[in-house]
Image (cartoon, rainbow, N blue to C red):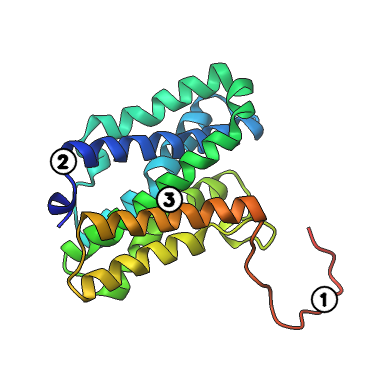
Amino acid sequence: MLQQLFSPSVLHTLDLIGIFVFAISGALLAVRKNFDVFGIAVLSEITALGGGLFRDLIIGAVPPAAFTDLGYFVTPLLATVLVFFLHPHVERIQSAVNVFDAAGLGLFCVVGTTKAYDYGLGLTASACLGLATAVGGGVLRDVLANEVPSLLRWDRDLYAVPAIVGAAMVALCLRFDVLNPLTSTTAAVTAFVLRLLAMRFHWRAPRAWHRRSTVSEE
């Protein structure tokens, strides 16, 4: 299915771009946490490849692509080198990094859903793995950095919801047999735009209804 939607070279290039941007976000967090160069590299690799590794292991696509394509492994290391030496400059273009991160989110939720479906999963399970592909690396990054995952924090702009919408659109297209380059691109762009709007207007998911607590918020 993926080969029918995108040429292998285009898909590979988009994958590497998404991996690179995700890796930068992991490396930047490692710098803020005062990790050494090895810690920066580990967090970079985990952030970039964690979601895809989880998906491939679940669907039985072994060995995972991250271990069969050297580019997938080397790209986060390039991001590590960039952030290690130039992190003050990278921090200054954080808004641009966030835009590319949103693009990676849109791409990975579409690719993850489609690949899971190719391996025989149902539509709901495929959409869930599309979400995991898009956000799994970020969750692993935060856990390793001893932080509450951004995915679970109410005070962070919507991140999972755009990926859920994109993955659900792909699942619906598969259900009605209308998945093609146009509809898959539309799903990715929709997730991308929703994430940008969430960052621009600080959209956040609601907390518990009539929430009452005497515990101070962190």
Q: Nearer the viewer, residue 10 or 12?
A: 10
The residue that disc 2 covers is 8
Q: Residue at x 80, y 62 (%)?
A: 217
Q: Residue at x 23, y 42 (%)?
A: 11
Hey, which quadrant is residue 132 in on the image? bottom left
The residue that disc 3 covers is 105
Q: How far apart are the alpha carbons under marks 3 and 1? A: 34 Å
Q: How far apart are the alpha carbons under marks 2 and 1? A: 52 Å
Amino acid under disc 2: Pro
Hey, which quadrant is residue 15 in on the image? top left
Instruction: Examine the rendered structure and indicate whether residue 207 appears above or below residue 114.
Output: below
Q: How many marks?
A: 3
Report the disc number at residue 213.
Answer: 1
Q: Residue at x 70, y 58 (%)?
A: 155
Q: How far apart are the alpha carbons under marks 2 and 3? A: 19 Å
Hey, which quadrant is residue 95 in on the image? top right
Residue 57 can be seen, yes or no = no
Q: Is residue 155 left or right of residue 199?
A: right
Please tell me how crowded label 3 is: few (under 14), some (14-19), or many (20+) other residues with Cα within 10 Å. many
> Which mark is first along the chain, 1 or 2?
2
Q: Measured from the top left, where is residue 159 in percent x and y?
A: 53, 57
Q: Is residue 2 left or right of residue 79?
A: left
Q: Nearer the viewer, residue 106 or 58?
A: 106
Amino acid under disc 3: Leu
